[in-house]
Amino acid sequence: MQITIIHGQNHKGSTYHIAKQLADKLEGEITEFFLPRDFDSFCVGCNTCFGKSELLCPHRERLNPITEALNKADVIILASPVYVYHVSGAMKVLLDHYGYQWMVHRPNERMFSKQAVCISTAAGAGMKSTNKDMADSTFFWGVAKTYKLGVAVFAVSWDSISEKIKGKIDKKTTNLASEIKRNYGKIKPTLKTKAFFSVMRIVQRKGWNEADRVYWQEKGWTGNIRPWNK
């Protein structure tokens, strides 16, 4: 099992430890990235990725290692502490660069067989909206199954979290790892994903732009081929 973790912070706090704990329990090969250390370029809104090709993105060279790791992964873990009820700015900056592969444009067929986990922590609240920030991307990428794990740690560092809460975290990551393992290699997109794809299939017969229209036609998706049927 190939696991890619995107940490939405450079420091190794509560969110990091929970993401790493889950990944270790999955017992696969782990690739990790820390933001903004490994990517810190703001999208400049040039629309080149949408209208022409993502290969022309001015930040492509720095983005490539992360893109390749996401493509290779069986399980994608997106982890961000809560920053004013949302993901960290660094995580948002990264996700902005993958708008071109939302189903409304040019989805990557490899995503439709993957599982993803969105993890967030806070001293108090905000995990639901933070996980939604990340899960919006995994859904619109076409990821077959996305799990959400939000934890109120009532602390500002991993070492200061109570043993009772750490015990609950351990139980949650154990259960989640077991479910991911059970689904490994046989996961299929949800009905919601398939329905949205079907709507986009109709739209892409004409397309938002030429790049999208040609992409869908070349994949055969405007006909009878589907990315999850291989």
Image: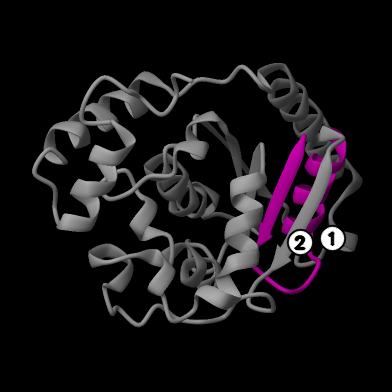
Q: Residue at x 26, y 19 (%)?
A: 224
Asked if residue 135 lies in the magenta stretch, the reply is no
Quarter of the figure with the N terminus: top right
In the image, which is nearer the foreground, mark 1 or mark 2? 1
The reply to whether residue 217 is visible in this rendering is: yes
For residue 155, which numbered disc appears in the image? 2
> Within 10 Å of the Cα at label 1, are there few (<14), some (14-19), or many (20+) other Cα atoms?
some
The reply to whether residue 165 is visible in this rendering is: no
Amino acid at dot 1? Trp
Q: Tags 1 and 2 in contact by the CB under 8 Å rule?
A: yes
Q: Residue at x 23, y 27 (%)?
A: 198
Amino acid at dot 2? Ala
> In the orientation shown, which residue stands out farthest toward the front?
218
Instruction: Give the magenta-colored segment's residue range.
Output: 1-25
The quarter of the picture where residue 209 lies is: bottom left
State the count of labels. Answer: 2
